[in-house]
Amino acid sequence: MPGRNRRNRTVLGRLPLPERTFVADALRTETVGGMVLLAAAAVALVWANTPWSSAYESVRNFHFGIGALGLDLSVAHWTADGLLAIFFFVAGAELKRELVVGELSHPGTAALPMIAAVCGMAVPALVYGLVATSLGGTWNGWAVPMATDIAFALGVLAVIDTHLPSALRAFLLTLAVVDDLGAVVVIALFYTSAINLAALIGAVVGLGLFFHLHDRRRVHGWYWYLPLALVIWGLTHASGVHATVAGVAMGLLLRVAEDGERGRRPAEWIAHLVRPVSAGVAVPLFALFAAGVSVTGDTLKNVISQPEPLGVALGLAAGKVLGVFGGSYLAVRFTRARLGQDLAWADVLAVAMLAGIGFTVSLLIGELAYPDPADLEHIKAAVLLGSLTSALLATVLLRLRNTKYRRLYEEENRDENADGIPDIYQQADPARPQSTDDTQAQHGDRHRHRGDRSVDT
């Protein structure tokens, strides 16, 4: 109809300035954390394949804690249930922010990453099931290849020195965050064998108090929330629900509305403070005590000959690519969306390959799905093989496109007048008419930038 705007909607185009600033901050920390994660995984693999492998097992299986509270856990258990709760807390905070003010807050822009993420979880699970059951295996590990490890993926990007445009990085970040939420839902629904109702009710009451203090009373001070978070975590662990669920629940309860004199959003600010601990300490330590797999000819033979490990490896290396790329293509094909003018489907394919790196959460779900150590060893080897294959394939394609990425990166970051705002955001873009909201957001970001600079000075 003449009165309606039927203009095609651009997806994976230039991000609004505030969104770009947030994504850059988040990915900067995750990239450093990804390098530490790669180093921790390498140490674990080397340590587990040396004459000192028995020392590795002794450290990983060493127990400590408070037995009366049911918290006499091994080092590996503490890193999986305790430290990864911090990782999922940050994921919950990032998802809350995306749902309220980020790319997922607008149905038009949310469609592509949401469809790609859902397909990127469903297709790997289906690939696993088809491979495992056709070869006489079981569905036990269907959830193992579902997740994307953003830190590992960014570590790969840093190692190969590619300049992926911010829109593609944001797309990868959104995929990983939605994947993490999906993983928590799967863990809560399918890997909870027995429920301690009293402890679960206590955890829910604790979450209610957390929400009341943070959102309703606007109480400040970490000394209120850290003890409360530990109690919520302990009750969740005692309830039989995996303790990482407590982390994502608290992250989702954080307030996103601007608060305080400097106009900070609590969810953004708290995630900014906690993210270095998550990316630089929690996830690498989990990897150190989870990735130690004995790599022998027999191990690799078992991965490609046994139904479940082969299903995991193919689910990551093939299922993720098919799911993310196929979901993205369908979202564009059957809507009025179109790719940004500087990008091609090969770029989406490269990100889909990166999404096949499922290291951290895949290892976690593998430990829950396969309690038998012998079976778990083969599943961990399959996760490593599938993730490594995805990383190598993505590296080849990204390096082929890196000249174009470098040019886009330089254009995005050029700031000739040195005012802290990239020049590309201060000029008219005929391909992307600027709305009043965008203009106000950019002025607000410029104002906060100058205010922060004056305060720091």
Image (spheres, grey):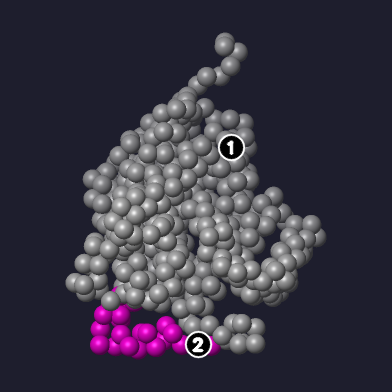
**Mark 2 nearby-residue class (10 Å; few <14, some 14–19, many ≥20):** some
Cα–Cα span, label 2 and label 1: 47 Å
Q: Secondary structure at mark 2?
A: strand
> Residue at image x 50%, y 46%?
20
Between residue 182 and residue 449, name the one nearer to us: 182
Q: Which mark is residue 106?
A: 1
> Residue at image x 44%, y 27%?
334
Q: Position of residue 333 (x, y in %)?
A: 41, 29
Residue 108 vs 36, above or below: the answer is: above
In this picture, residue 368 sits left or right of residue 382: right
Indicate the quadrant containing the C terminus: top left, top right, bottom left or bottom right. Answer: bottom right
Q: Earlier in the sequence, mark 2 or mark 1?
A: 2
Three-letter residue code for mark 2 = His
What is the number of callouts on the image? 2
**Mark 1 nearby-residue class (10 Å; few <14, some 14–19, many ≥20):** few
Q: Secondary structure at mark 1?
A: loop
- Quarter of the image holding residue 289? bottom left
Magenta range is 43-64
The answer to whether residue 443 is visible is no
The answer to whether residue 404 is visible is yes
Q: Residue furthest top?
A: 2
In this picture, residue 38 sits left or right of residue 442: left
> Residue at image x 49%, y 49%?
174
Q: Residue furthest right?
A: 217
- Magenta stretch, main secondary structure, is helix
- Quarter of the image holding residue 68? bottom right
Between residue 24 and residue 284, name the one nearer to us: 284
- Quarter of the image holding residue 255? bottom right
Three-letter residue code for mark 1 = His
Q: Which mark is residue 168?
A: none
Q: Mark 2 sits on what residue?
A: 63
